[in-house]
Image (cartoon, helix red, strand yellow):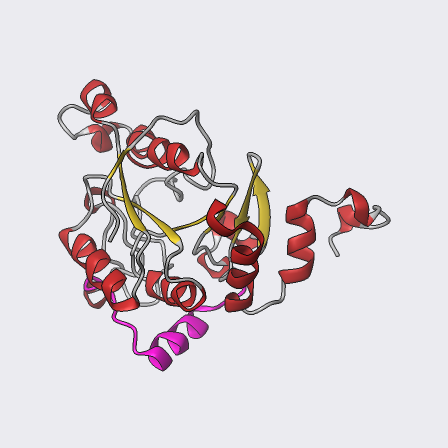
Amino acid sequence: MAFDQIDRPRARLSVAERLDERLRNAEPATIIAAAVEHYGERLALVSSFGAESAVLLHLAAQVDPGIAVLFLDTGMLFGQTLDYRKQLAERLGLTGVRDLRPRFEDLAVSDPNAELWKTDTDACCHIRKVLPLDAALGGYDAWITGRKRFHGGDRRRLKVVEEVAGQVKFNPLANWTKADLDAYVAKHDLPAHPLVAGGYPSIGCWPCTQPVEDGADVRAGRWEGSQKTECGIHTARAPGVAPFVGGDL
């Protein structure tokens, strides 16, 4: 039990704290099942369909293939990511995938030439990722992420269940290592993102993602040369702006 909870009456623990207490050492499939049982249709899974996404998506598909999966199509993604999103969702039988896109109005005002990433990556991420996701998550009470502690940075202190801005976040893979992920992929013969073989262990938008050398930090190729380590969807919350939502698969 965390130090700040010592001698604290259990009745005063929040829902997220109770769930984390119960699930902090559970297997990912158990965590996902508990999230689905507790929140049902008020739960969404957020996925980038990136380098490590197949594991979480496969786990979720075993629990509920109809789970809402939110995919941020920023307009700056690699073509390989868009192809992978379609192919992987079909292979896993995920029927609730939704494409979230930034509002045309926001792009027209703040990034009409699609060059904001050159001068202000935080603002670019805010328009293309944070605002659309915040708006979509307004319809849910809880969501599932694919974050892991071994990615480093602030993620080293990641809880399995946490509460952020009044919503509960489940991080089923928080305890897993790279070896755990690789073993799961091999066991279930999951297809890799096509860019992984080219040295991309973490994949975001094409202007801000670079390949890395073997042995480098997993996220070293994201916003290379800057202090930025997160796009903002896990560190910021903004008033919702309705995104364009594409059709489900």
Q: What is the quadrant of the N terminus in the image?
A: bottom right
Residue under the image location 35 percent in, 67 percent down: 215
**The residue stretch that appears in magenta:** 175-195
Name which quarter of the figure residue 117 lies in: top left
**Residue lying furthest bottom:** 187
Point out residue 194 in the picture as x, y percentages from the top left corner: 19, 64
Point out residue 126 in the picture as x, y percentages from the top left corner: 34, 31
Residue under the image location 28 percent in, 34 percent down: 128
Q: Is residue 140 above or below residue 107?
A: below
Point out residue 186 in the picture as x, y percentages from the top left corner: 34, 79
The one nearer the camera, 224 or 66, is 66
Is residue 224 shown left or right of residue 235? left
**Residue 132 is one of the magenta-drawn residues:** no
**Residue 192 is one of the magenta-drawn residues:** yes
Residue under the image location 27 percent in, 61 percent down: 89
The one nearer the camera, 107 or 214, is 107
Point out residue 236 in the picture as x, y percentages from the top left corner: 46, 33
Residue under the image location 21 percent in, 25 percent down: 107
Name which quarter of the figure residue 247 lies in: top left
**Residue lying furthest top:** 109
Name which quarter of the figure residue 76 lies in: top left
Q: Is residue 22 above or below residue 210?
A: below
Count the labels in the image: 0
Q: Is residue 125 above or below residue 9?
A: above
